[in-house]
Image (cartoon, helix red, strand yellow):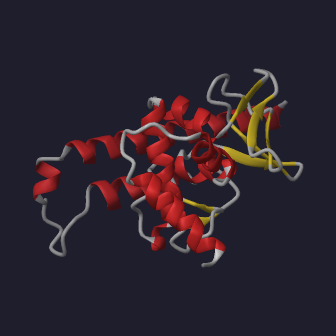
Amino acid sequence: MTRANRSAGFYCRMAKMGKRQFTDQQLFHIRNHIHIRTVIENLLGIPSMKKENVFRFRCPLCAGYNTAVKTSTNLARCFPCGKNFNTIDIVMLVRNLDFVETVELLVNYKNDLSSGEKQHSCVYGRLPAINLPPAERKPCNQPSHIKDIIAQLFNNVIPLNSDHKITSMQVFPSTEDIAKLERLVESLSQQIEYLKATQLNQKQ
């Protein structure tokens, strides 16, 4: 059995555990075998950039960009806050989930990554990457472009049929549709704040 098959089997077993308590070894896999940068960019859609060839993300606590990711420890750090984030910490904070919900989300996310997609793919907007088809994922090192987020608002949340008539989903949006729209609007707001901050720094 290859290492990849063993890893996939491990996360499948974890996914079936449901609400049962997780072992230290299982939590170690979650904290260390899922790249923190991938979680920041892809799963959470946190605004990020490369400055002087260093990956920076917006801290979910202070909203500053004086941050870094250390590959050897798989930790993200905000220097002004003096705070280190592992994969579980940052998902709990940004998604406002409890511990068990966070671990289950990361298990499903890891299973999705193990299906053959590269961990450094980046999805536009703050959408869960778990159920998106590969065609919707695009490699990137910069924050999402506003035009792409707006395109998602109309293409994903309010699709039109071939005759451009209003569909039933447009008239009666589901709770899931509303939640998706809220996440996209929030992501758009984050990008606007990032662009304003960048413009202000350039003027200074």
> Where's the C terminus, which quadrant?
top right
Q: Nearer the viewer, residue 69 or 22?
A: 22
Q: Is residue 192 visible?
A: no
Q: Residue at the location (65% across, 38% down)? A: 194
Residue depicted at x 55% and y 41%: 23
Give percent across and percent down for residue 76.
74, 38
In the picture, which quadrant includes the N terminus?
A: bottom right
Residue 180 appears in the rendering? yes
Residue closest to the eye, 87 or 27: 27
85 or 171: which is nearer to us? 85
Q: Quadrant of residue 65?
A: top right
Q: Position of residue 106 (x, y in %)?
A: 51, 48
Q: Residue at x 36, y 52 (%)?
A: 153
Whole-percent x, y for residue 96 in the image: 46, 29
As drawn, which residue projects farthest toward the bottom?
Answer: 1
Which image quadrant for residue 179?
A: top left
- Judge left or right: residue 171 versus residue 73: left
Of 29 and 203, which appears nearest the observer?
29
Give the answer, above or below, for where 39 lies relative to 189. below
Left or right: 164 as drawn, with respect to 10: left
Tell me how many marks there are.
0
**In this picture, is 202 found above or below 144?**
above
- Compared to 103, does 119 lie above or below? below
- Identify the residue at image location x=79%, y=22%: 82
Taking the image as shown, residue 176 lies to the left or right of residue 153, namely left
Pinpoint residue 28: horizontal percent, then vertical percent. 65, 45
